[in-house]
């Protein structure tokens, strides 16, 4: 299928789903779009089995999209930049300690806890999957997804401090999550008999610190360029070029694209590009990136729904998916609770906040993209199906009930 046709069909589907949701269903945007996309994908699978010619174009569209490459190499940079550009950096600095602990130690703990619990449960249900693959599953599903988180909490009643912690954590935890994922994946591919710690340390330094430095350098250059002009069209082009150049450079140098883009977004977003008081280019640029964020979010979640057509074996793994949902919620809760016990001076919170942070820790397209990037093994379908169930539950169920959970624990406190 031609690239333009693929993009056109995705945009048409996104507009159609958005209209149906806004006109008739009236669920929160992201949740409604995912729900409609899943329902239509199920109908497509059924129709395709009865008469393939009727569902031909939607089936071909789903099978022609390289979801993993599209999300990780193309869409993610734009989505993360828009999220970080509009993030309140003053609030982030105030909550930086809990954000740092949750985005590093929290991810490692969640991966370990998830892997151990999932392995134990699979033994109980006589499902054979090696422990190292359980940890691999934990590594790709533990980091909270900044795209899903940003889309859901945008209209929630989260208190300001918790919103900042959740947003900041989701933007910063991809670095450690990616290192864990790549390290454990390398361990599985080597047969589980060796692990090069020097190579792992070098990978961490290159991915994380290289990405941060790249983001600062490119962000500074772009900011200085935008600061010297007043033409808004050129300012927008420079910001778009910033994201695209970072994605290309980070891929070429094997740096972390998410960390590089987030760093550039925080750097540029924290500094006004207005030349004088009569110019409002910075505010207009924020609105531009908010529009890009909402459009790409819609397309991404339409793509998540379409993945059902590519995963016809999902009905074989509903049990593993249900177990995975329970395990990830437990892992998330303990990965927040344990740092509170050992880092009381750094992280201050209470049981109510832990419950809210647990329920607001959403997973999204990045987890599915990482699962799809796994090389073939007897356990790939189990991990992919489990990831899909967790993501759908996370976006639809947790997203729909987040405000109810907030009201239950903090009934008198709003945003």
Image (tube, rainbow, N blue to C red):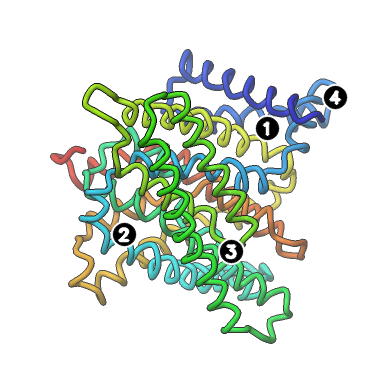
Between discs 3 and 2, the one toward the N terminus? 2
User: Spatial distance from mark 3 to mark 4, Cα to Cα?
Assistant: 36 Å
Which image quarter holds the N terminus? Answer: top right
Residue matched to label 2:
99
User: Spatial distance from mark 3 to mark 2, Cα to Cα?
Assistant: 23 Å
**Residue found 24% across the figure and 55% down from its top:** 93
Q: Residue furthest top?
A: 23
User: Spatial distance from mark 4 to mark 1, Cα to Cα?
Assistant: 14 Å
Residue matched to label 3:
137
Between discs 4 and 2, the one toward the N terminus? 4
Q: Residues within 10 Å of mark 3 (few under 14, many from 20)?
A: many
Residue matched to label 1:
42
Instruction: Look at the numbered discs 3 and 2 and tell me whether their residues touch, using CB distance below 8 Å.
Output: no
| Secondary structure of the residue carrying numbered label 2 | helix
| Secondary structure of the residue carrying numbered label 3 | helix
User: Spatial distance from mark 3 to mark 1, Cα to Cα?
Assistant: 25 Å
Instruction: Look at the numbered discs 3 and 1 and tell me whether their residues touch, using CB distance below 8 Å.
Output: no
203 vs 289: above or below: below
Residue situated in front as seen by the camera: 31 or 253: 253
The label nearer to you, 3 versus 2, is: 2
């Amino acid at each position: 299928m031609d690239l333009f046709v693929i993009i056109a069909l995705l945009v048409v589907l996104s507009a159609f789903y958005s209209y149906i949701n806004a006109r008739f269903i009236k669920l929160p945007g992201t949740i409604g779009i995912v729900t409609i996309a899943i329902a239509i994908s199920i109908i497509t699978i059924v129709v395709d089995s009865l008469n393939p010619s009727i569902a031909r174009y939607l089936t071909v569209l789903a099978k022609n999209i390289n979801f993993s490459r599209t999300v990780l190499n193309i869409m993610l940079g734009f989505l993360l930049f828009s999220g970080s550009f509009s993030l309140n950096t003053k609030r982030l600095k105030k909550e930086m300690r809990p954000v740092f602990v949750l985005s590093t130690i929290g991810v490692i703990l969640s991966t370990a806890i998830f892997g151990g619990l999932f392995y134990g449960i699979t033994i109980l249900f006589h499902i054979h999957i090696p422990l190292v693959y359980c940890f691999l599953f934990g590594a790709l599903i533990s980091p909270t997804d900044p795209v899903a988180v940003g889309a859901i909490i945008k209209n929630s009643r989260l208190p300001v401090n918790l919103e900042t912690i959740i947003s900041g954590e989701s933007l910063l935890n991809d670095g450690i999550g990616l290192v864990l994922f790549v390290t454990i994946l390398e361990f599985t591919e080597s047969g589980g008999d060796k692990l090069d710690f020097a190579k792992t340390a070098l990978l961490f330094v290159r991915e994380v610190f290289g990405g941060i430095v790249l983001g600062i350098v490119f962000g500074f250059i772009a900011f200085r360029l935008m600061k010297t002009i007043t033409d808004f069209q050129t300012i927008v082009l420079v910001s778009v070029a910033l994201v695209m150049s970072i994605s290309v450079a980070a891929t070429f140098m094997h740096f972390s694209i998410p960390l590089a883009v987030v760093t550039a977004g925080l750097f540029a977003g924290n500094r006004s590009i207005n030349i004088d008081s009569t110019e409002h280019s910075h505010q207009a640029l924020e609105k531009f990136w908010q529009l890009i964020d909402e459009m790409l979010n819609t397309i991404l979640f339409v793509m998540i729904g379409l993945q059902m057509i590519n995963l016809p074996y999902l009905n074989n793994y509903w049990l593993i998916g249900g177990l995975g949902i329970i395990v990830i919620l437990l892992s998330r809760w303990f990965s927040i609770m344990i740092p509170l016990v050992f880092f009381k001076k750094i992280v201050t919170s209470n049981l109510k906040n832990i419950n809210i942070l647990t329920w607001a820790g959403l997973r999204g397209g990045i987890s599915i993209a990482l699962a799809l990037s796994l090389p073939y093994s007897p356990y790939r379908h189990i991990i992919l199906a489990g990831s899909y169930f967790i993501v759908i539950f996370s976006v639809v169920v947790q997203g729909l009930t987040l405000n109810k959970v907030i009201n239950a624990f903090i009934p008198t406190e709003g945003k």
